[in-house]
Amino acid sequence: MEGNILTEIRNSEKIAEDIIERTKRERESMIHKAKINSSKLFGAKEEEIKKTQEKKLIDFREKSKLITEEKIGEGRKTAKQVKTKSEKNVSKAVDFVIKKFEKLI
């Protein structure tokens, strides 16, 4: 009887040790899977952030180009207006110089 009880205790201890060992393996497996999943998620988020930053940079460059073209257009328009105005004033200036020169003579 005592032998049976000791055998049952040893069997129970063996079963408990097997359960503990299996639980440890499962725990390690779960931790490993969690690390892999978090690494994948982190990589995906990094890629998403990179794409977002690239899009913002492209948008900024396009906006900058449009503003530059607008400013150049305004400058050309102003230059054209100044040229037109100066061409109108050339004849007036010539008349003025001729009159001043005639007064000196």
Image (tube, helix red, strand yellow):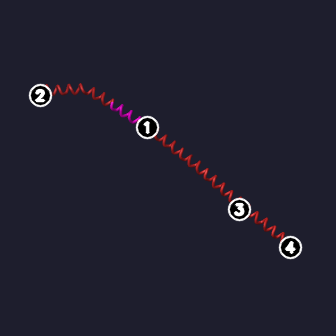
Which three-letter amino acid code belongs to the residue tagged 2?
Leu
Question: Where, by quadrant of the figure, is residue 92 drawn?
Answer: top left
> Label for residue 104?
2
Labelled pair 2, 4 in contact (Cβ < 8 Å) = no
Q: Is residue 78 magenta?
A: yes
Other-residue count near label 1 (Cα within 10 Å), few / some / many at <14 / 14–19 / ≥20 = few
Real-space CA distance between mark 2 and mark 1, rounded to the nearest whole angstrom: 56 Å
Residue at 63 percent of width and 55 percent of height: 35
Where residue 36 appears, x then y in whole percent? 63, 53
Q: Disc 2 or disc 1, which is closer to the eye?
A: 1
Name the residue at the right extreme: 1
Check disc 1 and report its element: helix, strand or loop: helix
Check disc 4 and report its element: helix, strand or loop: helix
Main secondary structure along the magenta-highlighted residues = helix
Query: Magenta segment range?
Result: 69-79
Q: Earlier in the sequence, mark 1 or mark 3?
A: 3
**According to the image, label 4 marks what residue?**
3
Labelled pair 4, 3 in contact (Cβ < 8 Å) = no
Where residue 15 appears, x then y in whole percent? 79, 65
